[in-house]
Amino acid sequence: MQRLGQRLLAAINEPVVLAEATVRISASAGAAISRVELCDPDRLLNASDVAMYAAKRAGAGQCVVYESWMHL
């Protein structure tokens, strides 16, 4: 999951030329994983939100996967 997140963030960070100006975007990403049979969509979304804010605290361009110690 971490590698996929980093690949997505690298693609987002690629420079784009708009009206003769080069624009670069950065992002942070949070992800959460659950087994399908145990998946509660609201809880999964909340977990990924917690992970996203952890990624933002870690600095631009980070991807963090939710872990139970992060707490909801």
Image (spheres, rainbow, N blue to C red):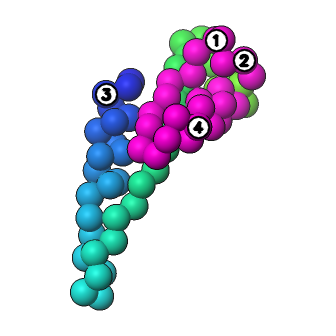
At x 29%, y 82%, the residue is: 21
Give the amino acid type for the residue marked by disc 3 in the picture: Arg
**Viewer-closest of 18 and 43:** 18
Q: CA distance from mark 4 to mark 3?
A: 19 Å
For residue 38, what is the image quadrant?
top right
Give the amino acid type for the residue marked by disc 4 in the picture: Arg
**Proximity of marks 1 and 2: CB atoms separated by less than 8 Å:** yes
At x 52%, y 35%, the residue is: 58
Q: Which residue is mark 4?
A: 57
- Mark 3 lies on a secondary structure that is helix
Classify the position of the N terminus by image quarter: top left
**Viewer-closest of 31 and 20:** 20
Residue 19 x/y as whole percent: 29, 88
**Proximity of marks 4 and 2: CB atoms separated by less than 8 Å:** no
Outermost residue to the bottom: 19
Q: Is residue 43 above or below residue 16?
A: above
Please report the bounds of the magenta region as a residue range: 45-72
At x 42%, y 54%, the residue is: 26
Q: Which residue is mark 2?
A: 71
Q: Which mark is residue 68?
A: 1
- Mark 1 lies on a secondary structure that is helix
Residue 29 x/y as whole percent: 49, 40
Magenta-drawn stretch contains 68: yes
Q: Which residue is mark 3?
A: 3
Q: Is residue 53 left or right of residue 72?
A: left
